[in-house]
Image (tube, grey):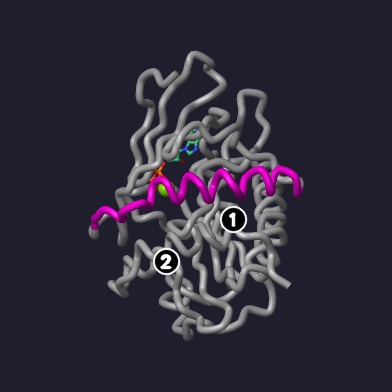
Amino acid sequence: MKLEQRYEGKAKKVYATENPAEYIVEYKDDATAFNGVKKAQIGGKGEINNAITAHLFPLLERAGVPTHFIEKLSEREQRVRAVTIIPVEVIVRNVAAGSFCKRLGIEEGTALSRPVVEYCYKSDALGDPLINTDTAIALGWATNEELSRIRELSLKVRDFLVPFFAARSTRLIDFKLEFGKTLDGTVILADEISPDTCRFWDAETNEKLDKDRFRRDLGGVEDAYAEMLRRVTTPAQG
Ligand SMILES: Nc1ncnc2c1ncn2[C@@H]1O[C@H](COP(=O)(O)OP(=O)(O)OP(=O)(O)O)[C@@H](O)[C@H]1O
Ligand SMILES: [Mg+2]
């Protein structure tokens, strides 16, 4: 049962439950971009992102990544383990896109000869600025050991997801992860994995099938999210 609301973010609400070790997350249709400057609703997004995350997290768990996911409760809700979110967003890049291209003056789609793991300070007020691991340690956001574990788990997520999506005609260009700590200090994957937090390009056409359709006014936003749910839940081809 949902008790009081604990957080409301841009895409989800988090509620307490009778069990202090568990929360209920409710996925909303609200979409924001450019640090909240652009706002809209994406029809069906809450249900789609809930379904995609609820599909992927148990697969990741089986691949050796501990996650907060317990069970899907309804079209918009899932039960998760309550964690203290580590205020470091992890971005894993396989192909250059987005802010990486802007920052470095390179063309979107440029191949990277190895995955790139980047860290940002999770702060809406500051626009999630890029940091390095020294910064996170020096400011007490995470320990060296926690950051090593976060990097290891992030690359495990990548190693699972890249072939998973490749088998479903989709290039995983980059993605953002959030980790949290349980009461006993274990680092687990939290938050979500969805078209809000990943860049997906069609393997044949490079058509964008993610939140960039909203950010860049490309149209067909709802259709792209629905197509990604279909691909995620379709058995691998070939
Ligand atoms: N298992 C969990 N326990 C506690 N908090 C969680 C858990 N999973 C996700 N959260 C947090 O829930 C909040 C709401 O999620 P939402 O995606 O709406 O945030 P957001 O607006 O994207 O903001 P942020 O930039 O802080 O992620 C986020 O702060 C997220 O870190
Ligand atoms: Mg979020």
At 61% across and 60% down in the image, what residue appears?
A: 234
Q: Indicate which disc, 2 or 1, sits on the residue closer to the N terminus.
A: 2
Q: Is residue 112 shown left or right of residue 152?
A: left
Asked if residue 170 is among those painted magenta in the image, a careful observer would answer no
Check the image and report above or below for 237 versus 62: below
Kind of residue indicated by mark 1: Thr
Disc 1 target residue = 233
Q: The residue tagged with tag 1: helix, strand or loop?
A: helix
Q: Quadrant of the C terminus?
A: bottom right
Furthest-top residue in view?
Answer: 18
Q: Is residue 116 shown left or right of residue 238?
A: left
Q: In front: mark 2 or mark 1? A: 1
| Magenta stretch: helix, strand or loop mostly | helix
| Label at residue 135 | none
Q: Quadrant of residue 71?
A: top right
At 36% across and 51% down in the image, what residue appears?
A: 44
Near-viewer residue (110 or 221): 221
Kind of residue indicated by mark 2: Ala
CB of residue at label 2: within 8 Å of ligand 2? no
At 66% across and 29% down in the image, what residue appears?
A: 185
At 69% across and 48% down in the image, what residue appears?
A: 59
Q: Is residue 44 shown left or right of residue 90?
A: left
Q: How many marks on residues?
A: 2
Near-viewer residue (166 or 226): 226
The span picked out in magenta is 39-63
Disc 2 target residue = 224
How many residues crowd mark 1 within 10 Å: few (<14), some (14–19), many (20+)? few
Q: Position of residue 216 (x, y in %)?
A: 31, 72
Q: Quadrant of the N terminus?
A: top left
Check the image and report above or below for 83 versus 139: above
